[in-house]
Amino acid sequence: MDMFYFILQNTMFFMIPLLIVALGGMFSERSGVVNIALEGKMVMGAFTGVLFLNIFQNPERVTDHGILLLALLVAMITGIVIALLHAFAAINLKANQIISGIAINMFAPAFAIYVAVFYLHEQHVPFINQFRIASVPLLGDIPILGPLLFQRTYITTYLGFLIFGISAFVLYKTKFGLRLRACGEHPQAADSVGVNVAKVRYAGVLISGALAGMGGLIWIIPISTRFGGSVAGYGFLALAVLIFGAWKPKRILFAAFFFGIMQTVANSFTGIPFLLNLGIPASFYNMAPYIATLILLAFTSKNTQAPKAVGQPYDKGQR
Amino acid sequence: MKRDGLLSFLSTLVVIIAGLAIGLIVLLVSDVERAFPAFWTMLSFGSRSMRNIGDVLLGATPIILTGLSVTFAFKTGLFNIGAAGQFAFGGFVAIYIGVQFTFLPPALRIICSILGAALAGAVWGAIPGLLKAYRNVHEVITSIMTNYIGMYLISYTIQNTIFDLGRTTTVLLPDDSNLPTLGLDVIFREPLGTGYRSSAVNAGIVIAILIAVLVYIILDKTKFGYELKACGFNKDAAKYAGINQNTNIVRSMMICGAIAGVGGALNFMNGTGLSMNAMPVLAAEGFTGISVAFLGLTNPIGVIFSGIFVSYLFLGGARMQPFGFSLELVQIVISVIIYFCAFVLLVKNNLGTLFFKRKE
């Protein structure tokens, strides 16, 4: 049973950043802008967030959630700034959205390492992990549910679920959500009823920047004590989660959970006697999440539809 | 047509200057005093001797091929982000044949290595192609998956076959499994003491340029290339014209994979003792290829020059380290250039239509 709890607790560490970043990608792509730059935004968010912690953190305190929230804010703002570049190219200049995404993905790690090397004289920015919650008061003592959700956890886990709830609400129950979806499906139609397509798309891309930047920091905190300019392809994985999740919040939640648990099993199979006894080499456990995704996508994609206008710059003259 | 080529060249030049200017600003912000000498080193080192020029060509070889791979895909309406995996598979198979097939005469072994690499890359490229054609899965996402699967698979295979435990890489290629230098070592060398020090540049760059020309001919001068491009331009129109779109997607991806695979082969068969890492890492050449492709304005001949340019910057950029600047500055410069490239295609197209309209 302890093993079961352990796996689920660890699953959260991988699932939550994937969930948040994929939801970010959802806002951008449902508005009609391809967002291959999630990886770069995550890297930049993680970098500035960790740098902020590195400078302002007080090592004397045992737990310090205030500084964590501030760092998350810094990461979000960074993500928004980077997203502005993407939005400008994609919306104002009607440029190829994949190319500017590639540029951002290339720029982010190079910039992070360049700055780190120049000011700290090493590639990694260290920080202290003082954000782990051993057990949430009261809630952590509930049998079964306590160990599952409220022990060995981070405040960011709840933030992730909160963002999920808000995202689903915004997308389906608000005027803005309806307009966003309209711009991604048929921008001409949206425009004809007075929706400012450029504005809505800007909003979509900037939200994705904020969430991706934040997701980068949330990814690095539980699993390391230093940041070295890489989020290990999680931005791309989030993109896979988004597509596997068919651009819909609930399915994204499920996809992120699936990835999280696969990743956890891959990382900790040596501690699981049953899996260890199978004698399968570690490499294959590492491959498993990706192979499983390929297979699942092969069977589920035939009928899923990407937002119809995704990747196409909006051209007023085109009907 | 001529006007178009000139326009491309000029717009690329503007973009490169803009990228370099931002690089210089980053250097100036970091350290005013050392910025200019470091910047000058980056810009001039690649041409300071014939040997350095040779090294630029050596470094350009693999990225020209990954760049061609991305270009070929882009021209046929696909986005090949999987060049990293195809490149790695090609490299591994080439090394495997070079190390294990010593019963073959060297010339035949080298040819087998390259063909084997092409085949391996094609097989790895076929997976996203098949999934795109028959299962409607976007090739970007499947390529990302196949990159990671390939990374672990190759790491595992190296560790169980041609593994050098001490260096945690593949074992060293025998000398006669490397590409011939074709006398290039005599051209690209610099005096050292009483003798010469040669660059390791070899037949690889010649093969890369030949493949670029071949890609140009296939895409622009053959019916096959026309059909592939038609699918990229407008798949419904292509279908209406009786072109089998699904088969062409798979063919395109296999050709892309083969080109990137050959890049992997040429990268490791250069006689410098470069071996493949047995740890799971994605091949950077695959992603540099994307930059090279767009910097070359997704034109096969342009890719030759952009590959050489990027290699030139990397070689010079590595020399900035004594000034306290890391090689990452080069990546920053190139990424800024790529970002601006996104505008170039646009500006160029607009100017192009303007020009045509006037003519009518």
Image (cartoon, coloured by chain):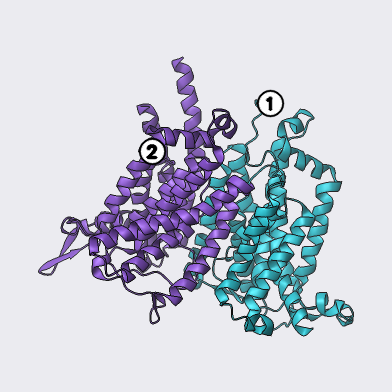
Residues packed near mark 1 inside 10 Å, few (<14), some (14 to 19) or many (20 plus): few
Camera sees residue B263: no
**Left or right of A43, for residue B20:** left
- Residue A184 vs A3, above or below: the answer is above
The colour applied to the residues of chain A in this rendering is cyan
Q: Residue at x 82, y 80 (%)?
A: A147
Image location of residue B33, percent across then percent down = 38, 61
Image location of residue B281, percent across then percent down = 49, 68
Q: Disc 1 sits on a residue from what chain?
A: A
Q: Which chain is purple?
A: B
- Residue B353 vs A67, above or below: the answer is above
Q: Given the image, on which type of amino acid does mark 2 rest?
A: Ile
* Residue, disc 1: A319
Q: Are marks 2 and 1 on the same chain?
A: no
Q: Secondary structure at mark 1?
A: loop
* Residue, disc 2: B218
Q: Residue at x 70, y 79 (%)?
A: A130
Judging depth in this view, the residue of A190 and B242 nearest the camera is: B242
Q: Label 2 to label 1, Cα distance in Å?
A: 35 Å
Image location of residue B141, percent across then percent down = 60, 54
Q: Given the image, on which type of amino acid does mark 1 rest?
A: Arg
- Residue B326 vs B225, above or below: the answer is below
Judging depth in this view, the residue of B35 and B7 nearest the camera is: B7
Mark closer to the observer (2, 1): 2
Instruction: Return the residue found at the far left.
Output: B194
The quadrant of the image that shows the N terminus of chain B is top left
- The quarter of the picture where residue A132 lies is bottom right
Judging depth in this view, the residue of A220 and B108 nearest the camera is: B108
Camera sees residue A156: yes
